[in-house]
Amino acid sequence: MAEVVEDATLDEMLAAARAIMPRAYVPYSHFRVGAALLNEDGTIRPGVNIENASYPLSVCAERNAVASMIVAGHGKILAVAVATDAPTPTPPCGGCRQVLWEFGDVDTPVVAEGAGGVRARWRLGDLLPDAFGPDDLT
Ligand code: THU
């Protein structure tokens, strides 16, 4: 069962995700995404999307945040935040849901904020039902 994450922490994570958005490298889509992950020790790891002239090699903000978390020595995601300037809050794409699942669980909160502060909230288990994950390989 996931630990309860305070609303104030989710607010802080969304602020961190929004603050990092200007660093997104998005010359092709111009769609900036900022992500932030909460680690076991309460630290927050940000990420942005990084696109490439070879389009399929572009990497989403959430997956870059996972890379940053792993490099920093963490291995568990307690919450996920995603910020964009889209009219509706942007949920993690299918590929990112799978990568987040590796380090989260059914109850991990996923919050998103779009333009004008409009927000949405999900549980990771609802975004990726019947997920394939590490337990399937034991
Ligand atoms: N993108 C993300 O960074 N996260 C998502 O979950 C959805 C899509 C990025 C990928 C690409 O750089 C741009 O948004 C448009 O798809």
Image (cartoon, rainbow, N blue to C red):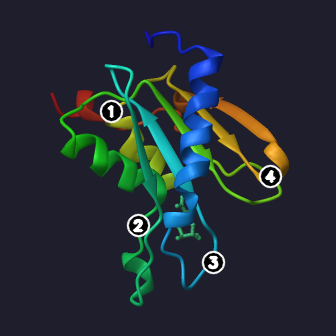
**Camera-nearest residue between 59 and 11:** 11
Callout 4: SS: loop
Determine whether 77 is above or below 5 in the image. below
Callout 3: SS: loop
Instruction: Please tell me how crowded label 2 is: few (under 14), some (14-19), or many (20+) other residues with Cα within 10 Å.
Output: some
Res 88 label? 4
Callout 1: SS: loop
Q: Is mark 3 within 8 Å of ligand 1?
A: no
Question: Mark 1 or mark 2: which comes first in sequence?
Answer: 2
User: Which image quadrant is residue 86 in?
Assistant: bottom right
**Camera-nearest residue between 78 and 46:** 46
Residue 138 in percent (x, y) is at 15, 27
Res 30 label? 3
Q: CB atoms at circles 3 and 1 under 8 Å apart? A: no
What residue is at 39 percent from the left and 21 percent from the top?
42
Which mark is nearer the camera, 3 or 1?
Answer: 3
Determine whether 56 is above or below 48 in the image. below
Q: Amino acid at mark 4?
A: Thr
Residue 115 can be seen, yes or no: yes
Q: Amino acid at mark 2?
A: Val
Q: Amino acid at mark 1?
A: Phe
What residue is at 63 percent from the left and 19 percent from the top?
8
Ligand 1, by image quadrant, is: bottom right
Res 59 label? 2
Q: CA distance from mark 3 to mark 1?
A: 29 Å
Q: CA distance from mark 3 to mark 2?
A: 14 Å
Question: Mark 1 or mark 4: which comes first in sequence?
Answer: 4
Q: Amino acid at mark 3?
A: His
Q: CB atoms at circles 1 and 4 under 8 Å apart? A: no
Question: Mark 3 or mark 2: which comes first in sequence?
Answer: 3
